[in-house]
Amino acid sequence: MTRPVVAAAVLALLSACSGGGGGSGNDNQLQLNFAPEGTTQFSSLGQNVVATTNDHGDLTAITIGDNNFSGDAISDQNAKTGRGHIAEMLGAVSAGQTTQDFVLDNDTLNHAAFGLVSDATSTDAFAFGIATQNIPTTGEATYAGRTIGAGTDGSGTQFAFTGKAQIDANFATRAVSANLFDFNTQSINNGVTTPHVPDLSGSGNFTPGTGDYTFGLGSEGKVGGVPVWLGQGSGRLFGPNAEETAGVWTAQDSSDNITVQGSFGAK
């Protein structure tokens, strides 16, 4: 996953050249099929995302928050979002083998994507895409998908995780319920036992007149009536007919000082 990082100044040149025709796309280039050709500032959560694609749908440059990627820093390797791939990214950045890197789930959804970006100072979750404009006001929907993320255990060691996500939406009442479950974890250090992340669930609401929603999270296990794990998240509807949803979330185990953050996508 370690790749050289090209200077941010190259972004402008790539943007200007992205409309060139002829030839075929690079087989090793990351595709962003829902993106229009050229430079687009997407509807995003967690981190602002601006991406440039060429006429083959290849992603030639992307800015995620304060991190800029272009050239050899972008390839189909960025679309590998298994636990091992995420742990490799976190470990390489932590060891100073690369200054920044990102992983992007570009297969779960057709109108959005979600991922993690890491640099020397932080790891952040993000989601972005083409937001729904005509928000449903009646009916219900159940969205099923996955979540990926990164955490830090009580000793400060980072770990990667993957899991499943389900979002239930009632468009008439604007109520939302979120379930994140079946987590599997992997440390950035070989042989290190990672903490258990329990199933997390909670409820929330849509912001009136929008496809945005927020929700709380808590574990089933409680101490003194309070969930051991507590967290919160935010999501958005994507696609012309609200076919998909994606967002970001955070949670922590206050008793063992474990913190996690993730992004999710479901349809």
Image (cartoon, helix red, strand yellow):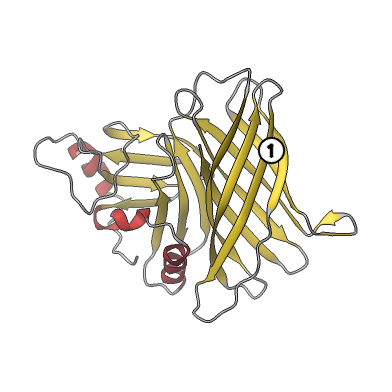
Residue 45, x across and y down, in percent: 53, 40
Task: Give me the residue at 70% from left, 47% from top.
Answer: 201
Crowding near pointer 1: few (<14 within 10 Å), some, many (20+)? some
Task: Give me the residue at 50% from left, 77% from top.
Answer: 189
The number of numbered discs placed on residues in the rendered structure image is 1
Residue type (three-letter) at the residue carrying disc 1: Ser
In the image, residue 207 above or below residue 57: above
Residue with the most extreme right position: 224
Q: 164 left or right of 16?
A: right
Residue 82, x across and y down, in percent: 44, 60
For the N terminus, which image quadrant? Answer: bottom left
Residue with the most extreme left position: 22
Residue 190, x across and y down, in percent: 49, 79
In the image, residue 240 above or below residue 149: above
Between 125 and 110, the residue placed more toward the observer is 110
Q: Is residue 74 visible?
A: no
Q: Is residue 200 visible?
A: yes
Picture quarter containing residue 33? top left
Picture quarter containing residue 174? top right
In the image, residue 91 above or below residue 134: below
Residue 117, x across and y down, in percent: 45, 55
Label 1 sits on residue: 177
- Tell me the element at label 1: strand
Residue with the most extreme bottom position: 191
